[in-house]
Amino acid sequence: MPRLEIADDGFRLDDRPFRIISGALHYFRIHPEQWADRLRKARDLGLNTVETYVPWNLHAPRRGEFHLDGALDLPRFLDAAAAEGLHVLLRPGPYICAEWEGGGLPSWLLTEDGIVLRSRDPRFLRAVDEYLGALLPPLRPYLASNGGPVLAVQVENEYGAYGDDTPYLAELADLLRRHGVDVPLFTSDQPADLDRGSLDGVLATANFGSRTAEGLAALRAHRPEGPLMCMEFWIGWFDRWGGVHARRDPADAAAELDLLLAAGASVNIYMFHGGTNFGFTNGANDKGTYRPTVTSYDYDALLDEAGDPTPKYAAFREVIARHASVPADPPPAAGPKAAYGTVELTRTAALFDHVDALGVPKTADRPLSLEELGHPFGFVLHETDLPTPGPVVLHAEHVHDRAQVFVDGQPVGVLERENHEHALAFTVPRPGARLAVLVENQGRVNYGQGLHDRKGLLGRTTLNGTAPAVWHSRALPLDDLDCLDLRPSDPARPPVGPAFHRGTFTVDEPADTYLHLDGWTKGLAWINGFPLGRHWSRGPQTSLYVPGPVLRPGANEVTVLELHAATTRRVHLRNTPDLGPTEE
């Protein structure tokens, strides 16, 4: 493929004027067996390029590890894009935001006391150097300079909204060059942050979803010459637990796109296809109040969570056709969906009966964080012996993020970071009673100054004002459930406290479906060991997307972790989702 050139009057490709018409989709939010389908639909829309972030924390969950296979096989994704004739804009971070856990920064960075993230702190830059040294050599054949699809690579991400250290950006640009990136580099920032987030000699782009004329004018004022490009043209938004499902009128978004293209600008539609925050991968925001993002990353995008075209897809295709060539083929149709019916979850395993199999305890004079225990995702269980019988007040300086409190296995209350809760009173029933605090990592902060987001009971934790001398802490990553000994459920004796529930269902022909959890409270779900993500009756979403490739002909297994209690032992596999009410 020809190389991208950045000229005073715009982009050029193969020495011809070129406009980038791109759409964002994240390979790590899509089942790899569905990459080709999503990329084909990008081409059918009239896109000539796709854009993706690269999540450092997923590729390197622990220092010294690096994974580039399976669902993280980025070379395979780039091959699939090239097979559709699509160029690629690559955004490797190190910070990506993306409403993704920790903004893509690996949790093991937080084990370094006092480390300053997104800075010239030598410890941070050394880790970034290791990351890029593992990521980029296998990707060099995919750079446009070597005939591959990658036209350009981003330096950092919206840095101007976070800091004001141009030498830091220059260090990152130098690292990219030293690791073999010889295609154009670019930065992306909101219009008000362009001065702080851009770098001389590097293409500057702007991010906005409305007030297009103002956004382009700000970019032109910042860079009097060169291409105009909106790197994130926001056409929807993400959802948070306890909120509503975001919707944007397709006609309104399409009208803004028309203005942008009429001005001669290039564009990257964010998101073309959002996908799903499978497992524990959702991020969170904290602007004074912690707000975790939901499992779905539907984003009200052009393709919905299952990859089906939405009304916005048709509206955008019509606009793009006014300004560029669009394939003559008819727009793609929705893929097949299956309603496999009701599944009885007939087997149960109490979480507290399996903690020794799920995690190894470590003893200290304070609760140890999830990071200190060496695990990026999941839960951390803190235990200690209680003082003499009588009333007790548990006080935790910082709860990150949601703590369920138990005395001798009996629930006595919940402390939530989101509600700024720090204290809980209860009665100790007997000498030597056991206190257990199960803390859920609900997602590390992905935007702003709160990125240094350790998980567990942090700071000073006391009982009646005194810190216990001994705590036993263990990480429960829940990345392998094979150790569970699930027994037949007894309806007359429902489990007290968190428990796993499992049932089987039969599939003749695998297809996309949706797991509905009517009557369940909070937890996670898996099908055939694949982590679908979190469920919470707080909403807005009350169903979880199940990619067809997760299923197999014949018997299939669904497992639900319920952290509280459920009014049923049934789940339902339906052919439509429920992402919750929208704000009128």
Image (cartoon, helix red, strand yellow):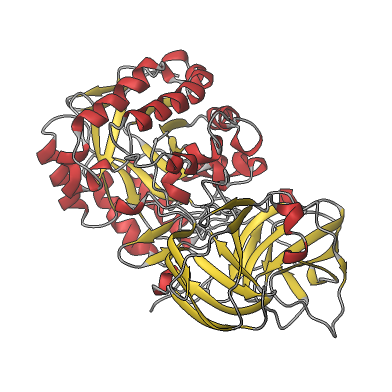
In the image, is 352 to the left or to the right of 472? right
523 or 368: nearer the viewer: 368
Q: Nearer the viewer, residue 328 or 298?
A: 298
- Residue 199 in sight in this render: yes
| Viewer-nearest residue: 495 or 576 | 495
Q: Is residue 46 visible?
A: no
Q: Residue at x 37, y 50 (%)?
A: 451
Give how far across and how far down residue 129 sits, in percent. 41, 24
* Left-right relation of 425 to 252: right
Quarter of the image with the C terminus is bottom left
Q: Viewed as shown, does residue 46 lie left or right of 550?
A: left
Q: At 56% across and 31% down in the image, what residue appears?
A: 74
Is residue 523 left or right of 105 when viewed as pictured? right
Residue 235, quarter of picture: bottom left
Residue 73 in percent (x, y) is at 60, 32
Q: Nearer the viewer, residue 133 or 208?
A: 133
72 is higher (above) or lower (below) than 387: above
Residue drawn where x is 30% and y is 52% of the image: 449
